[in-house]
Image: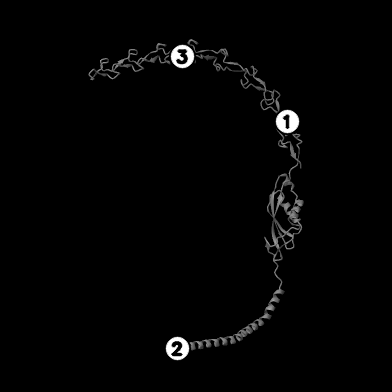
Amino acid sequence: MNRVVLSFVIALIGLTLFIVSIVELVKVDAPDSHNAKHEIQITKDSSNIGKSIQNVNSQSNQPKPEDNNIYTTVAQMPQFVGGEEALNEYVKNNLSYPHIARANKVSGIITARFIINKNGEISDISILNDIGEGCGDEAIRLIKNMPSWIPGYQDNEPKRVLIDFPITFTLPPPLYMTCSYCNGLGYVSKDEVCSNCRGRKYTLCSYCSGNGMRQCSQCSGSCYINCNYCNGKGYYNCSYCNGRGYNQCKSCNGYGYLFCRTCNGKGIVRDQFNRLRSCPGCRGKWKFTCNTCRGYKNIMCSNCRGQKKFKCQYCNGHPQKSCSYCRGTGNIRCEYCGGSCNFLCSNCNGTGYFRTKVICTHCNGSGQIESN
């Protein structure tokens, strides 16, 4: 057992010495190979240095192409000299409102489009939306007379930039003065021919149509009138029977018969032995003929005796009589014109014209007009 352990220890020591010797050989050979590779790389780079220097020199000598593109946005946008306040002041002092647009009260916003070149000058002016009446031409004139702008820059180089510039046309508040046509009253007096009498001062009576007479309202021109009591019939119906000549029998209520009181209209009764037998009062007929109407249900009217109507005591049977209002003529003198057929015109009081107040057309009733 001791021999086996001793042999194993000797083998382990020998293996350790072999590994150490191999590591030392690798450390000695590594620097030489690294230097060789480094020297090869240097020689390769040194051979291309001349060519790269020549290419750089040739590129720097060639001129760059000029950029004439039009940009909408750049890093540094064009600016009016003095800034936005100076631009607003320029527009305010130099914009002239066209006279036609002022007279027609035209106002609004016009959008002008132009290009700021590399030297700051303005070119290619156009109007995107024109409100008319010379406002577009005035906007073009205003932009043409603008001083040069500070150009726009991109990558520290000037560029051509497209600008949309809004110009507002606002009407100034109007100045008013007293209207000389109506002296500030807002209306003027005017004499017009009367439309009712057409200047004749008199008009035909509308109630009698110029005849001086008008139809009698009582008899409607028929010269006579009906009796008010009988409505022109000469008679009036009996109020007791309403013109029928008869009334319903009150004894039997219009049935023509009466019920037997002994059996209450049944026709049979019970005797003392509680047996049913024929009623001795009506002998089983359960009813009697009414003695008042004799079964006819109605009786003659006691007021008119069946005549149904009475002669009118006011007209004595003659329903029409001569009209006392027009005395049988059928018409009467017109109470409005007194029979003269015409009268003074009520619209103009007989003057033939009338004075009216008309709204002044120059100031539309306000009493003031705008001063030019």
Count of marks, rendered view: 3
In front of the other: label 2 or label 3?
2
Instruction: Identify the secondary structure beneath mark 3.
Output: strand
The answer to which image quadrant residue 335 occupies is top right
Q: For the N terminus, give its image quadrant.
A: bottom left
Q: Which mark is residue 236?
A: 3
Q: Which residue is mark 2?
A: 2
The percent position of residue 370, horizontal first and vertical second, equals 74, 40
Disc 2 to disc 1, C-alpha distance: 154 Å
Given the image, on which type of amino acid does mark 1 rest?
Answer: Ser
Type of residue at label 3? Tyr
Distance from label 3 to label 1 (Cα)?
A: 68 Å
Q: Is residue 321 above or below residue 113?
A: above
User: Tag 1's secondary structure?
Assistant: strand
Residue assigned mark 1: 189
| Res 45 quadrant in image | bottom right
